[in-house]
């Protein structure tokens, strides 16, 4: 996917897309082979369980509110104006325990794993299955292998095994 010139308006997602992941609303703003950036509304009391991106760096630019990020045994709090850096291979979980909704911009690089997820979603829909990847009513879907490569590895008791990450509905 080649980056096209232009502007993604404030309230819009690329191709009119947005999706719900673990109670968060994600709206894609930029997507190329090299990177993907999406806006996120993260309600109080929601979280992304601890996981690893074996092949992607991830970052969060905080716009409003605050998020707690746990790296293995360390806890950090990101506030408006901060950038949270999550290098590939480092276990991390993201929590909103602030009492209010947080808004931010997420980014990952490279974005090949997300492209593979989108292609898998299209194949899934073309078979008439109609189910949405990532819409498991608040649960992660069954362990999945997308494009022959695992892109996210959840951690902790009861973790479902490798899943495409982020789990998105396209």
Image (cartoon, rainbow, N blue to C red):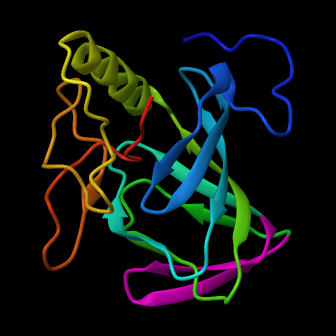
Assess whether residue 77 is covered by the magenta stretch.
yes
Q: Residue at x 13, y 74 (%)?
A: 158
Q: Is residue 113 above or below residue 27?
A: above
Rendering quarter of residue 140: bottom left
Quadrant of the snapshot with the C terminus: top left
Give the left or right position of residue 94, taking residue 5 as reference: left
Q: Residue at x 57, y 26 (%)?
A: 34
x%, y% of residue 50?
35, 71
Q: Is residue 157 above or below residue 134?
A: below
Give the left or right position of residue 24, taking residue 151 as reference: right
Quadrant of the snapshot with the N terminus: top right
Q: What stretch of residues is rendered in magenta? A: 63-80
Give the left or right position of residue 161, taking residue 64 as reference: left
Q: 62 or 24, which lies in front?
A: 24
Q: Residue at x 71, y 82 (%)?
A: 100
Q: Residue at x 61, y 56 (%)?
A: 59
Give the left or right position of residue 55, taking residue 47 as reference: left
For the stretch drawn in magenta, the main secondary structure is strand
x%, y% of residue 3?
68, 14
């Amino acid at each position: 996917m080649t980056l096209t010139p232009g502007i993604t308006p404030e309230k819009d997602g690329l191709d009119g897309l947005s999706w719900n992941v673990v109670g968060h609303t994600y709206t894609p703003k930029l997507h190329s082979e090299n990177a993907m950036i999406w806006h996120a509304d993260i309600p109080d009391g929601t979280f992304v369980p601890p996981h690893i991106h074996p092949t992607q760096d991830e970052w969060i630019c905080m716009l409003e509110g605050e998020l707690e990020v746990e790296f293995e045994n360390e806890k950090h709090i990101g506030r408006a104006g901060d950038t949270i850096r999550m290098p590939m291979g480092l276990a991390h979980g993201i929590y909103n325990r602030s009492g209010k909704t947080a808004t931010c911009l997420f980014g990952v690089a490279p974005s090949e794993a997300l492209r593979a997820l989108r292609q898998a979603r299209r194949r899934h829909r073309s078979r008439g299955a109609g189910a949405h990847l990532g819409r498991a009513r608040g649960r992660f879907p069954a362990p999945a292998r997308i494009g022959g490569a695992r892109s996210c590895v959840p951690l902790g008791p009861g973790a479902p095994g490798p899943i495409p990450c982020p789990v998105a509905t396209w």
